[in-house]
Amino acid sequence: MSRTGTLRCLLAAVLFGATAPAAAELAATVPAFTLAGLLYLGAALAVGPAVVRRPPARAALTADRRQAAVAVVFGGAIGPLLLVAGLARTSAASASILLNTELVATVVLAAVLFREHLGRRVVASAALVTLAGVVLTWEGGGGFDTGGLLIVAACAAWGVDNGVTARIEHLAPEHVVALKGVVAGGTNVAIGLMMAGIGAGTTALDVLAALAIGAAGYGASITLWVKGARELGAARAQVIFATAPFIGAAISWSVLAEPVEAVQLVAVGLAALGVAVSLLSAHEHEHHHQTVTHDHEHVHGPDGDGHHDHEHPDHAQPGRFVGRHAHAHAHREVVHAHPHVPDLHHRHEH
């Protein structure tokens, strides 16, 4: 599998794992709609400079409009709203356990709804990471109350968002995050202000904190995840991203000097094994590529994937460009066999 895609998903997990507890703290004072909106407005601020440098083309917006609309509604509006509403109604232990259902939802929906090839290793790796989450966070007595059901519903919404977002072929990841931030974030903030105002206990520092958390834990994190998912497929990318709670535990040990417990080491070991199994899940068979034109990040040269050998007429040395970049390019029809995962070029049936 792609090393770059794997590293991006891991870094996305680091950012989300480090900022999620802070968002939970804000849920106690900032109204749900307002907080959900502020988090995604912060995400839009994080990717704003990249969008200004390379704004989306009208053709890209037209080509990906349906997928982008689903991602905005489910990932940017419904998911965050359900999450912050659930965080205010359930215990931290139950919330941590239930957040692992995003992995289950993504894997199931990737296979059933989006016809993404999984294989036994991906199913096994998802089960291992989910089990590790339960081991790490279970304190006993956790119940599935209204808050828990809201978090499960949020994870289902993000499962839909993950499957759709991984299939967007023309808009850059920064464009997708900006759309979620401006459209869904702005809408949620507006609804929150009309329904509950800014919140009696909300301070200016809370607002700034929500924007900062959104910039790192949503803006930068989602951008990295989307780039990774394009190279790995939604299910494999989510298996890696689901290590966020364990990365948060490692940060607690090293930065906050919290004691290391045996059960935590067992959970981290299970999660590491799950990720390792997913990295070995590429498969090989003869498959057919249709002629297609799309726009996404890709690599030329020795580290390329063999699918990007096109010319660059506007380059100083056409045909000799080496490195990673993004632009609109065409693929010719071809039938061949090689190891692959369900990236943007391998969405075929099995």
Image (cartoon, grey):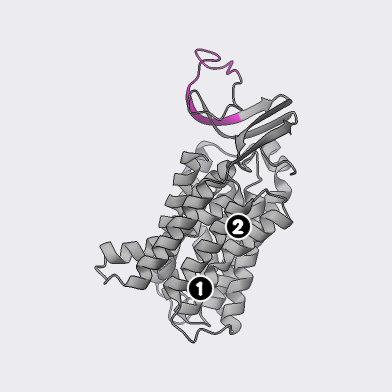
Q: Residue at the location (56% across, 51% down)?
A: 236
The segment highlighted magenta reads: 311-327
Counting other residues with Cα less than 10 Å from the Cα at mark 2, is it few (<14), some (14-19), or many (20 or more)?
A: many
Label at residue 123: 2
Is residue 16 at all visible to an observer of this figure? no
Counting other residues with Cα less than 10 Å from the Cα at mark 1, is it few (<14), some (14-19), or many (20 or more)?
A: many
Up-down: is 333 above or below 207?
A: above
Q: Amino acid at mark 1?
A: Ile
The spot of residue 80 in percent (x, y) is 57, 67
Q: Residue at the location (46% across, 84% down)?
A: 140
The spot of residue 169 in percent (x, y) is 65, 40
The spot of residue 204 in percent (x, y) is 39, 70
Is residue 296 at all visible to an observer of this figure? yes
Say which element carries label 2.
helix
Q: List the residue tagged with mark 1.
A: 97
Say which element carries label 1.
helix
Say if the magenta span includes residue 16. no
Q: Toward the viewer: 298 or 109?
A: 109
